[in-house]
Image: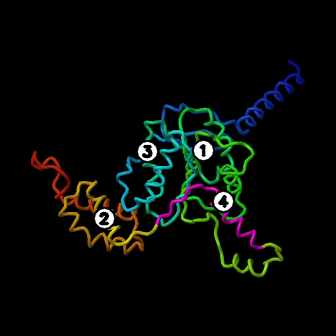
Amino acid sequence: MTALEELLATLIARVERLTERLDAALPRPLAAPDWPRAVAWRYRKRGGACRLEPVPSVGAIALGDLKEIDTQKEKVARNTLQFLQGRPANNVLLTGARGTGKSSLIRACLNEWAAQGLRLIEVDKADLPDLPDIMALVAGCPEKFIIYCDDLSFDEGEPGYKALKSALDGSVAAAAPNALIYATSNRRHLLPETMRDNLAARHGENGELHPGEAIEEKVSLSERFGLWASFYPFSQDEYLRIAAQWLAALGASPAQIAAARPEALIWALERGSRSGRVAQQFARDYMGRSASDQPPAAAAPAATQGGPA
């Protein structure tokens, strides 16, 4: 082989390696996963490759486990059942106080009706521009899909904001008949609202001729959700009832639950919040400490049942 031929072979090998690297970096179309493998999926995008990853285990929470949110639970469960039965249903926005059961309610609906064909796909805010691809992928499936966006809020100018608006209502393409969007947020209008907005409405900040339209733009996204469910901070009695429920679920006796009330109140006071999440965290801590005070299970009488005494 001549020197020229060797040089040409080397260049060809380098071009082939470069082509392989470029091919790996190029975006690939979203492929359908093995749907029977799971009832919940996460959309992931890494290095130009996008895929649906199965969630091996969904938190085992049932609709009956959710307390003190009966009105919200009735609205969301009714809408989900309508959707599952092929009747008209709405996209849903769950907003309000943190830790009050917004995400838990969506998971509970999935657990309630997964056996009837309900499925869930979790999408991060950064990946919302890919919603059309996800909708197109599920459109031909027999299952019903909830596209789930947790803790959703936007800063002005983020690309996912426009993409979500179009997916909800506004795109020339029809929405997938077997997919709805459920989102949770601590902000009712999903965008930060400032005093400047009110000043602009009166004075036309930065010379804007129609400043009121800027405010309309901020509320237009939340209005595209057909159903709203608002969650509110719990009262002290509601918080204590939720804490008692979590304690009972972890095996606490009625005497333990009554004795835990003062500590539950102190726990909430230290965190500045009376929420279902705080109640659950207290119950775990309390029962964990109680269990450490008990003798090993092997030393207990064979007839002993229930949680620690």
Along the horizontal axis of the image, is 118 left or right of 24? left
> To which residue does mark 1 refer?
44
The correct choice, above or below, for 284 with respect to 272 in the image is: above
Along the horizontal axis of the image, is 282 left or right of 293? right
Q: CA distance from mark 1 to mark 3?
A: 17 Å
Image quadrant for the N terminus? top right
Q: Amino acid at mark 3?
A: Val
Q: Amino acid at mark 4?
A: Leu
Dot 1 or dot 3: first in sequence order is 1
Residue 223 on the magenta segment: yes
> To which residue does mark 4 refer?
221
Residue at (15% x, 55% y) in the render: 295
Nearer the observer, 8 or 127: 127
> To which residue does mark 3 refer?
58
Q: Position of residue 74 (x, y in %)?
A: 44, 54
> To which residue does mark 2 refer?
241
Are the residues flagged by discs 2 and 4 in contact, CB closer than 8 Å? no
Dot 3: what SS?
loop
The quadrant in which residue 8 appears is top right
**Residue ranking furthest to the top:** 1
Residue at (35% x, 60% y) in the render: 280
Q: CA distance from mark 2 to mark 1?
A: 38 Å
Dot 2 or dot 3: first in sequence order is 3
Along the horizontal axis of the image, is 188 left or right of 11? left
Are the residues flagged by discs 1 and 3 in contact, CB closer than 8 Å? no
Image quadrant for the C terminus? bottom left
Dot 1 or dot 4: first in sequence order is 1
Looking at the rendering, the stretch of residues picked out in magenta corresponds to 211-231
Q: Position of residue 240 (x, y in %)?
A: 31, 67
Residue at (64% x, 44% y) in the render: 46
Residue at (58% x, 65% y) in the render: 188
The correct choice, above or below, for 248 with respect to 48 in the image is: below
